[in-house]
Image: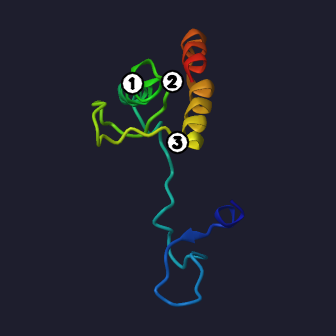
Amino acid sequence: TQCVEGGCCYAESSEPGVPWCFQPTEVCSLHHESTGPPFSSAELGVLRSHFLEHIDVNGSGAVVASGDKEWMEGAYQFHWERDGALSMQALMGTEPNQTLVDEKMEAY
């Protein structure tokens, strides 16, 4: 954060020993001035629905990262403790429906 606040630009250097954070001589390609929200309400709705599909999968309480909806042998269905906890924290901080939050937390 201190680096970014100082106007640094992050980029990998091909020169050994040169740090990733450096003072740009030109405009940093990562700098962006927002003129509005990054997503429309419709896009946020799609993101939210995909997020909720991966919480409490099949009523198991599991939080999974995969979009694979099939619970078959070989499917990528893992509940990673840290990722699950971060997802549940995100749900608590962003979901306005407290009943839904309570239901998902109870299952988790």
User: Which comes before the other along the chain, label 1 or label 2?
Assistant: 1
Q: Quadrant of the N terminus?
A: bottom right
Against 96, residue 78 (above or below) is: below
Identify the residue at the far right of this view.
2
Q: Tell me if residue 108 comes above or below residue 1 in the rendering.
A: above
- Which residue was labeled with disc 1? 49
In the image, residue 91 sits, relative to residue 102, either above or below, namely below
Observer-nearest of 24 and 102: 102
The residues tagged by marks 1 and 2 sit, at their Cα atoms, a distance apart of 17 Å
The percent position of residue 36, horizontal first and vertical second, equals: 47, 38
Query: Which residue shows up at 59% across the image and 89% down it?
Result: 17
- Where residue 78 sits: x, y (%)? 44, 40
Q: Quadrant of residue 86?
A: top right
3D distance between C-alphas at marks 2 and 3:
12 Å
- Left or right: where 66 falls relative to 100: left
Quadrant (top left, top right, bottom left, bottom right) of the C terminus: top right
Q: Amino acid at mark 3?
A: Trp
Element at label 1: helix
Query: Which residue occupies the extreme front position in the image?
Result: 73
Q: On residue 61, which mark appears? A: 2
Report how far apart the C-alphas of labels 3 and 1 lie in the structure: 20 Å
Give x and y (percent) for residue 29: 45, 66
Disc 1 crowd rating (10 Å Cα; few below 14, some 14-19, many 20+) is few
